[in-house]
Amino acid sequence: MTEEHEIATLLAAAFGGTHGSVTPPIVQSSLFTFDSYQAFEDRMAGRSDTAIYTRVQNPTVAAFEALMATSERGEAAVGFASGMAAISSSVLAFVKPGDRIACVEHAYPDAYRLFERMLRPFGVDISYHSVAAFEDDPDLLKGVRLAYLESPNSVVFQPMNLPKVAEQARRHGTLTMIDNSWATPIFQNPLVLGIDIVVHSASKFISGHSDTVAGVVISSDRLIRQIRDLTLPLLGAKLAPFEAFLLTRGLRTLDARMQQHQRTANVFVDRLSNLPCVTRVHSPGGNSVPGLHGRSGLMSFELDDSIDIPRLSDALKLFRLGVSWGGFESLILPARVGLAQAGEENSMQRFGVSPSLVRISLGLENVEDLWADFEEALSKSAA
Ligand SMILES: *Cc1c(COP(=O)(O)O)cnc(C)c1O
């Protein structure tokens, strides 16, 4: 396999298991034994790299990690039990008390909570900045250890000029980390644009089937080694072999699914923008910033007060009410119920999200069926 191949080809053509199988075997073993004392000693001294124990190494997990490294154009990858485990284990591998993190506004709400409720009490300073500030203030990252980015960000889906921000970060010696769950490696390869570390919630598009929770980090050999030495073994939030098998299965069809999500999303953006009751649509298209090559199926829009949002949610038949996204099924999430967090100031209040904002995840159903369902529900939702 070479760099010139399209990602879809790399994902489809990647090796399977033994006996000519096209899928990797699920190696459901906690430990791996050695044929001899000498082999054991060689492994512990680092003279071989066979698996020892599944908390840190497993062949089924390694097969998924290799595919992720290839598709994100990175040198290495490491899987985790969830997207949040990937995020927390990556941040903690590089940040210590006294350091500063600069985070983009409207980051994933649990990433925000990790920073505010866990890292701040441990003495890490966190500041939040708009996409425009990251792009236009050349001194924003002065003295910053880690820039934590999403492009587009969550909820309002503002895209960021990543090559520009990566260049500024390099000048200040700031490490850059991005959550690339929305775009997937099909529509955006942040490492190629100069970003240092890519994390994914693999529970979303990478799985694609709403049947597993998982995460993955992709970067250089050097940075992945630091995560493997420190937070993977010591926090222990490893990816399980069966989950890794499901994710490899998901990756084989990622390109085809993303193209279908994009076709449906383009139709919805077009038609939503023409509805008088829709005041804003948040959905960056391909080429809206350098290096973003497509529009995924997760978007949001704002409604005027002619529409009753609870009534709209209940009238939909194909769109189901719920959190998460990126699966085969279409979903609706009204911001004021789905993103509100009882009893604490949350990122939605802090950064200002309209209570009339509605997020939808467009699945793989027929686009005309989805639009007909949406239009009919709207017609039953007069406030
Ligand atoms: C869901 C999500 C996460 C967290 O992933 P989990 O697998 O649920 O832990 C992180 N980032 C984004 C953008 C997400 O949507």
Image: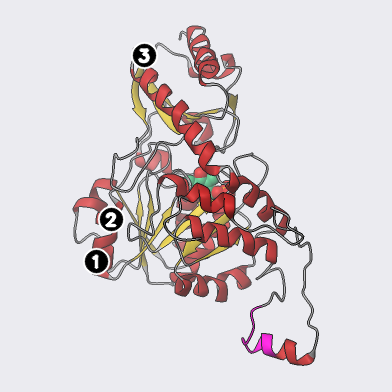
Mark with earlier residue (2, 1): 1
| Residue at image coords 61%, 52% | 214
* Main SS, magenta residues: loop
Amino acid residing under circle 1: Lys
Mark with earlier residue (2, 3): 2
Mark with earlier residue (3, 1): 1
Of residues 333 and 123, the one nearer the viewer is: 333
Q: Which residue is label 3 attached to?
A: 275
Q: CA distance from mark 3 to mark 1?
A: 44 Å
Q: Is residue 151 left or right of residue 44?
A: left
Give residue 362's position: percent from left, percent from top: 51, 29
Of residues 242 and 332, the one nearer the viewer is: 242
- Contact? badges 2 and 1 (CB < 8 Å): no
Q: Which residue is label 2 attached to?
A: 163
Q: Quadrant of the C terminus?
A: top left
Q: Is residue 41 left or right of residue 139?
A: right
Q: Which residue is label 1 attached to?
A: 142
| Residue at image coords 69%, 67% | 58
Amino acid residing under circle 3: Leu
| Residue 275 colored in magenta in the image | no
Within 10 angstroms of label 3, few (less than 14), some, or many (20 or more) residues? few
Within 10 angstroms of label 2, few (less than 14), some, or many (20 or more) residues? some
Q: Cβ(mark 2) to ligand 1 < 8 Å? A: no
